Image (cartoon, rainbow, N blue to C red):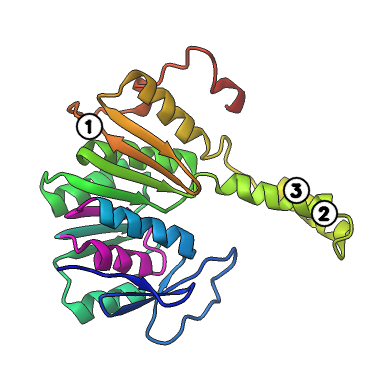
Amino acid sequence: MTILPMFLDDQHLRVGGVDFHCHYQWNNDDEVEPEGFLPVAKSRDQVERYLRLQKSMPAEVIVEIGIYRGGSTALLHALFQPRRLVAIELASEPAAALSAYIHRHGLDEVIRPHYGINQADRDGVAAIMAAELAGRPVDLVIDDASHLLHETRAAFETLFPRLRPGGLYVIEDWNADHLVADHFDTILADSSTPDHDALAHTLGLAATMQPVPDPRLVRLPLELVLARARKGDVIREVTVMENWVVIQRGEQPIDPREFRLSDLVKDHFANLRAIG
C-alpha cells in the first residue's frame, strides 16, 4: 500500500487518513493536541527526516526505544507499514494515544509495546527480542529514549547485532546537552535579559545541586567513528547530522551475547581521553 504523507501546516501531518500533531518544545508536558491528533514530540524538520527515510528504505521489522506519548510509534507504523514494530518504554503506564491507535486499527499483533523496561537492561531487552522476533533480523532501530551515554550504549550493544546487514540504527538527540548548554550561554552572555542576575544565580545553583552524567552522550558518536575506522565490516557507515546519528550495519556476523563497542575502538591518538 502506497503511503502519501502530507504536511498541511508546520505541525499537522496526515498519513493515510491519520492526523499527527508534530511539535517539540523544551517543556511540553502540559501541551494539549488538537482533538483527534496523535502527539509526536518532534519538530517538522525532524519528522521530515523520517519521511525521507521511508522513501529510501523498506523496513518490515522496526524496533523503537522510547515510546513517550505514543505518537512516534504510531507514526513509524503509518509510514513504514512494518510487519512487526516492537517498542520499549521505561515508564510503566501505557501511552493512551498509542493504545487507542492499536485498538482502532486492529494492530495488536503488529505493534508490540513493552512498558517498564530500562533500555540498559540487556537481558530484559534481549528477552523481548527473542519473544517477539524469534531470531528474525531487524531493519531499523530508533533510539529516542534516555539520551544518556551508558544507557544508550547498552541498548546499542544489545540491538545492533540484531540488525540485518545494511540495516540502520538511529540515535536521536545525541547533541541535546550541547544545545542546552549553548542556550544557557546565550542567556548568561546577554546582561540585558530581564532578571539576568537572578536567572544566572538559579542556573548556577541548579548546576551544583543536580548531578549530571559525565561524560555526555556526545562521546558515543566519537566512539562509533573510531570503531568504523577499524571495522568497516561491522559498522559500514556512520553519519552524524543535526539531532541524528545513523549507523549502518556491515556484513560481518556478530554474536549478540559478546558484542561490545569497546572491543572495536582503539583510541590510538587519545582522541577520547580529554572527554572522559
| Up/down of 257 relative to 112, above or below | above
Question: Which sits in the foreground, 39 or 116?
Answer: 39
Asked whether residue 10 is in view, the answer is yes
- Residue lying furthest bottom: 35
Residue carrying label 3: 185
Point out the frontmost of discs 1 and 2: 2
Q: Position of residue 149 (x, y in %)?
A: 48, 39
Q: Are marks 3 and 2 in contact (CB under 8 Å)?
A: no
Point out the frontmost of discs 1 and 3: 3
| Up/down of 97 relative to 253, above or below | below
Inspect the image, locate mark 1, and give the three-letter code of the amino acid beneath it. Arg
Magenta-highlighted residues: 57-82
**Label 2 environment density (alpha carbons within 10 Å; few <14, some 14–19, many ≥20):** some
Q: Which residue is found at the position 21% from the left and 40% from the top?
A: 162
Q: Which residue is found at the position 40% from the left and 21% from the top?
A: 265
SS state under label 2: helix
Asked whether residue 70 is in view, the answer is no
**Label 3 environment density (alpha carbons within 10 Å; few <14, some 14–19, many ≥20):** few
Point out the frontmost of discs 3 and 2: 3
Magenta-span inclusion, residue 79: yes
177 left or right of 168? right
Residue 257 numbered tag: 1
Q: Earlier in the sequence, mark 1 or mark 3?
A: 3
Inspect the image, locate mark 3, and give the three-letter code of the amino acid beneath it. Asp
Residue 103 numbered tag: none
Q: Are marks 1 and 3 in contact (CB under 8 Å)?
A: no
SS state under label 3: helix
Residue carrying label 2: 200
Q: Earlier in the sequence, mark 3 or mark 2?
A: 3
